[in-house]
Image (cartoon, rainbow, N blue to C red):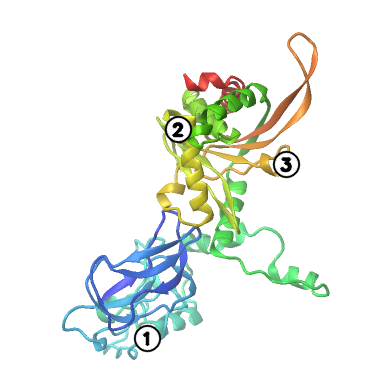
């Protein structure tokens, strides 16, 4: 029978994407491993390879269609001996899908009677096989398709199944899921905002996938993660002097270490010095890690990436510098693979190069903490001997998830970061 081609999940966090381009057309022969299409996620544009072999029988979702849900049917593959007539109605979960390629199946002799909700309702995310007409009727009548048994081919719900059914209250779980997006919306409704500024000239800017994802996840993070904040000023004079000496020695090799490279190393070592803080929140438990996988925020047009430097505590400063430059370059070109920006237990957001003195960063779940780094500026310093001098001071703020890290542990972690940066030679031992 025809094989449905589903919208793939190209990263663990992907929920929907844009079908940017088809590399095949209807009637083309497809072999396993062939590039079928280019899929644009919230982070990057990636190629989608065929798993099965056959002939491209029908393209369901057209190029350029946005908001295609993961596991929606985007096309149909035919095996040898099959034709377009064998396709029939194809399950679709996206309003962007094309019209069905064959008419509504004939109703069965006895239309299915209204059926009460099953003892074990469909799980969240499970696709319900129904024809587009049946879905429209169900929507108009307020029917819950999970409570209806289909009489069509392979259990598909057809017109006859929904015509005689009456609406029943949806389960609490479904209602909660439907209400979730509204609860995450911050500020007044769109119509209210448009009305408020109706007499002012403005341009409406549509949100791309990345901006929608950033908005939704950081709103959820700020609402659901119990943040608290710890602040320390870090004296950078010893580090700047040490960095200058190292860069002179590295100059023949064409390398130059940044202050950010030292910060990454200092955080990675601090997670080893305070291993209880090297953890993430996992719903009903925490996961504590042996290695220090440190994510670093990289600003790109329209959003940001947080590429992860894995095993950062074991890598030299020069290795971290080279890897970070490569990740940042490919992040700006949107060429990172999902495994390069997913994971980590700790993150760094450095706005010092933009002249920001200090700020509070929002934790990126499931991380337990993020370090916000400000600019190093000249300030008066009272030395241990009581003498007033001038030194370079960098303000840092550690945002902490209180579910994972308590106050004392967070303080110890930030103090370890400070000690590593103020005594940079120890990071080479």
Identify the residue shown where x is 34% and y is 87%: 101
Q: Secondary structure under badge 3? A: loop
Nearer mark to the viewer, of 1 and 2: 2
Q: Position of residue 327 (x, y in %)?
A: 48, 47
Nearer mark to the viewer, of 3 and 1: 3
Residue found at the far right of this picture: 199
Identify the residue shown where x is 24% and y is 85%: 86
Q: Position of residue 363 (x, y in %)?
A: 58, 42
Q: Secondary structure under badge 1? A: loop
In the rendered view, would you say 388 is above or below 25? Answer: above
For label 1, the residue is 100
Residue 307 shows up from this direction: no
Q: Between residues 15 and 39, which one lies in front from this camera angle?
A: 39
**Are there few (<14), some (14-19), or many (20+) residues within 10 Å of tag 2?**
many
Q: Quadrant of the N terminus?
A: bottom left
Q: Position of residue 210 (x, y in %)?
A: 55, 60
Distance Cα–Cα, label 2 vs label 3: 28 Å
The tag on residue 363 is none
For label 2, the residue is 292
Lower sequence index among marks 2 and 3: 2
Q: Position of residue 72 (x, y in %)?
A: 39, 70
Lower sequence index among marks 3 and 1: 1
For label 3, the residue is 355
């Amino acid at each position: 029978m025809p094989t449905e081609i589903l919208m793939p999940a190209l990263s663990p966090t992907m929920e929907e994407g844009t079908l940017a381009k088809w590399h095949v057309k209807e009637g083309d022969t497809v072999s396993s491993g062939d590039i079928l299409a280019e899929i644009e996620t919230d982070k990057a544009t990636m190629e989608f390879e065929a798993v099965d072999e056959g002939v491209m029988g029908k393209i369901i979702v057209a190029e350029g269609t946005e908001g295609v849900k993961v596991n929606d049917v985007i096309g149909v593959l035919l095996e040898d001996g099959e034709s377009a007539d064998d396709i029939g109605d194809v399950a679709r979960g996206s309003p962007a899908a094309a019209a069905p390629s064959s008419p509504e199946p004939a109703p069965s002799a006895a239309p299915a009677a209204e059926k009460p909700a099953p003892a074990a309702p469909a799980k969240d995310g499970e696709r319900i096989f129904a024809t587009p007409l049946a879905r429209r009727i169900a929507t108009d009548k307020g029917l819950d398709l999970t409570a209806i048994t289909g009489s069509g081919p392979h259990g598909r719900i057809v017109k006859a199944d929904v015509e005689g059914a009456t609406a029943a209250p949806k389960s609490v779980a479904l209602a909660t899921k439907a209400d979730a997006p509204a609860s995450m919306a911050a500020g007044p409704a769109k119509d209210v905002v448009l009305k408020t500024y109706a007499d002012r000239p403005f341009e409406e800017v549509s949100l791309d996938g990345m901006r929608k994802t950033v908005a939704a996840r950081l709103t959820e993070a700020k609402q659901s993660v119990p943040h608290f904040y710890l602040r320390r000023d870090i004296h950078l004079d010893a580090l700047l002097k040490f960095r200058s000496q190292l860069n002179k020695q590295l100059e023949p090799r064409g390398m130059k270490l940044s202050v950010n490279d030292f910060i990454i190393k200092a955080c990675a070592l601090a997670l080893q010095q305070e291993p209880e803080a090297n953890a993430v929140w996992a719903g009903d438990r925490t996961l504590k890690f042996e290695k220090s996988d440190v994510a670093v925020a990289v600003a790109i047009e329209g959003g940001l990436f947080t590429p992860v430097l894995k095993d950062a505590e074991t890598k030299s400063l020069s290795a971290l510098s080279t890897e970070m430059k490569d990740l940042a370059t490919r992040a700006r070109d949107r060429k990172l693979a999902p495994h390069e920006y997913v994971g980590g237990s700790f993150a760094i957001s450095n706005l010092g190069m933009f002249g920001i003195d200090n700020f509070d960063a929002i934790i990126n779940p499931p991380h337990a903490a993020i370090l916000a780094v400000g600019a190093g500026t000249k300030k008066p310093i009272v030395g241990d001997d009581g003498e007033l001098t001038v030194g370079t001071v960098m303000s840092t703020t550690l945002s902490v998830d209180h579910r994972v890290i308590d106050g004392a542990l967070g303080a110890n972690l930030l103090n370890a970061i400070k000690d590593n940066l103020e005594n940079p030679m120890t990071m080479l031992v």
